Amino acid sequence: MGNPFDFFKSPIAISAMLGWIMAQVIKLPTGYLRTKKWDWSLLFNAGGMPSSHSALMSAVSTAIGLTLGWDSPLFIFAVSSTGIVIYDATGVRRQAGFHAERINHILRSIVSEHKIDAANMDELREIIGHSPAEAVVGMLLGITIAIVVWKLMV
């Protein structure tokens, strides 16, 4: 069994952590530019610019490619997994957000017509997926972070 602190010597692990953390932190100023309000919940929420899922997975895939080689079976697996995650974020999760938006609209209409009590209604979270642009920016961020980390550590 290795030393648990060896994790922090791995350019793959550092790239993964920084990819996710940097994307979440960048959501603060991009959210502010969009709404002119600081929303600290963006540090922990899914959705928004850039995609932290795309950043994390692209950072991991790129770091694996740089470390183990572009023909490594682990790199091929990582790229495949990254593709699935990004597809899910821009497809399934984005559509679920659109559905939540419509359901919330319907529920607000029903409440306004006094057919149900507003106290019994919790709105669904509407921003859970990503636009293609948010995913691409996250992907480019992750790739950049992995290259910088690799150059600094190797």
Image (cartoon, rainbow, N blue to C red):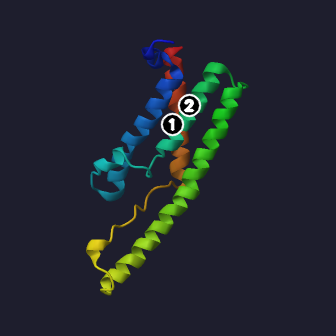
The image quadrant where one finds the C terminus is top right
Q: In this view, does 67 lie to the left or right of 26?
A: right
SS at mark 2? helix
In the rendering, at what x and y percent does residue 94 appear? 52, 59
Crowdedness near tag 2: few (<14), some (14–19) or many (≥20) residues, C-alpha within 10 Å: many
In the rendering, at what x and y percent does residue 7 appear? 47, 19
Q: Residue 56 carries which label?
A: 1
Say whether marks 1 and 2 touch (CB < 8 Å).
yes
Q: Which amino acid does label 1 sit on?
A: Leu
Residue toward you, 14 or 118 = 118
Residue at 32% x, 87% y is 113
In the rendering, at what x and y percent does residue 68 appear? 65, 20
Q: Name the residue under label 2.
A: 60
Q: What residue type is labelled 2?
A: Val
Residue toward you, 39 or 34 = 39
In the rendering, at what x and y percent does residue 89 appear? 54, 51
Above-or-below relation of 28 to 98: above
Residue at 29% x, 47% y is 40
Above-or-below relation of 44 to 100: above
Q: Is residue 132 visible?
A: no
Residue at 55% x, 37% y is 57
Q: In this view, does 5 lie to the left or right of 59?
A: left
SS at mark 1? helix
